[in-house]
Amino acid sequence: MKRIGLLVLAVLLAFSVASVSANGAKEGGQIVIGANIYSFADNFMNGVMKPEFERYATTLGAKLEMVDSEGQQAKLNDQIDVFITKKVSVLAINLVDPAAAKAVIAKAKAAGIPLILFNKEPTEAGAMASYDKVWYVGTNSAESGIIQGQMMVSDWKANPKWDLNGDGVVQYVLLKGEPGHPDAEARTKESVKAFVDAGIKVQQLALEADPNWSTQHGNDKMAAWLTSSFGKSIELVICNNDGMAFGAINALKAAGVKLPLYGVDALDQALTHIADGEMNGTVLNDGVNQARATLDLAVRAAMGKPVTEGTTWKLSTDGTKAVRVAYLPVTPKNYQDFRKK
């Protein structure tokens, strides 16, 4: 009888531990991740991060419920309320508006649900410190602009014929992403600053922002610029992402014009454009590893474990509770290294 009693006790203890480790998981103890993408219309988010989320969640044995916030923060807020009502184990949230982080964090905190923010870093001071179960996965926004700028400076120096009017000044146009987005702001600033830091004068002929980072926007603006009063003065095209770069390439080809052009993301199509000599460089925005890090942290947070335990990810030491995934330069010399195997 004593053995039977001990056996029953052991089973009950095991069941208790399993229940705690799931931390609100459903469906027989399976961890359920309530996640969103700020907009499925975004080339990078929908084409790189979303499929990796779906694939990697399966390998982790977690259930992923992912929704499209369609570029609307109000819609995302409602989607989070639905996830909370469903009692998901953990939230993985791609903010539409980085300035709305505190409200999102407050929702998760009130529900006692761990939260992983990814790709769009909160801009509100103190937001991340307001909840002990919130973390961020993303990049160092400035790094992509710095790398892109360094590539452009190096190539500009190596190609004196790019200075079409021979005035020693880089006349450029810039396709900017979403206004206020940390990546768009940092890339815009740092890419041009690289020329200034190298002692090269610059002249901005035009700059246009697009909240959707879209190929159509890139095409329309580039086409308009080429037929404008300064169209023949453009010497360089800087793009905050590959999606807009693809549109600019389409417009340049339609006009029979070839100009140095750079993007960010290293989408597979960008590698093809580099191979074809239609794009001079891009910067790998490692969405695959951002997705993996987000889910690794989410699963461990749902289980009540230290979020980087048993992983290769490291939390930054700057107090931001962030995992930073590095950017890498992609050029005509190394683009084949980034082809999907």
Image (tube, rainbow, N blue to C red):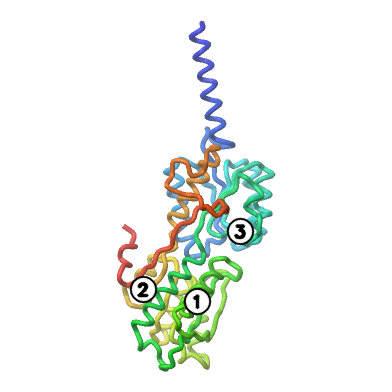
Label 1 vs 3, first from the N-terminus: 3
* Residue 277 position (above or below residue 37): below
Q: Quadrant of residue 177?
A: bottom right
Dot label at residue 193: 1
State the SS at label 3: loop
Q: CA distance from mark 1 to mark 2?
A: 26 Å
Q: CA distance from mark 3 to mark 2?
A: 33 Å
| 110 left or right of 64 in image | right
Residue at image coords 50%, 53%: 323
Task: Provide residue 307's location: percent of width, then percent of height.
Answer: 51, 43
State the SS at label 1: helix
In this rendering, the label closer to the viewer, 3 or 2: 3
Q: Which residue is label 3 attached to?
A: 122
Task: Provide residue 310's location: percent of width, then percent of height.
Answer: 44, 41
Q: Nearer the viewer, residue 40 or 288?
A: 288
Q: Label 2 sits on what residue type?
A: His
Can residue 67 be seen? no
Can residue 225 be seen? yes
State the SS at label 2: helix
Q: CA distance from mark 1 to mark 3?
A: 24 Å
Q: Label 1 sits on what residue type?
A: Lys
Q: Which residue is label 2 attached to?
A: 273
Task: Provide residue 116's location: percent of width, then percent of height.
Answer: 56, 49
Q: Label 3 sits on what residue type?
A: Pro
Residue at image coords 64%, 50%: 129
Label 1 with label 2: CB-CB less than 8 Å: no
Q: Nearer the viewer, residue 250 or 288?
A: 288
Label 3 vs 2, first from the N-terminus: 3
Task: Provide residue 14's location: percent of width, then percent of height.
Answer: 51, 24
* Residue 296 position (above or below residue 24): below
Q: Residues within 10 Å of mark 2 (few under 14, many from 20)?
A: some
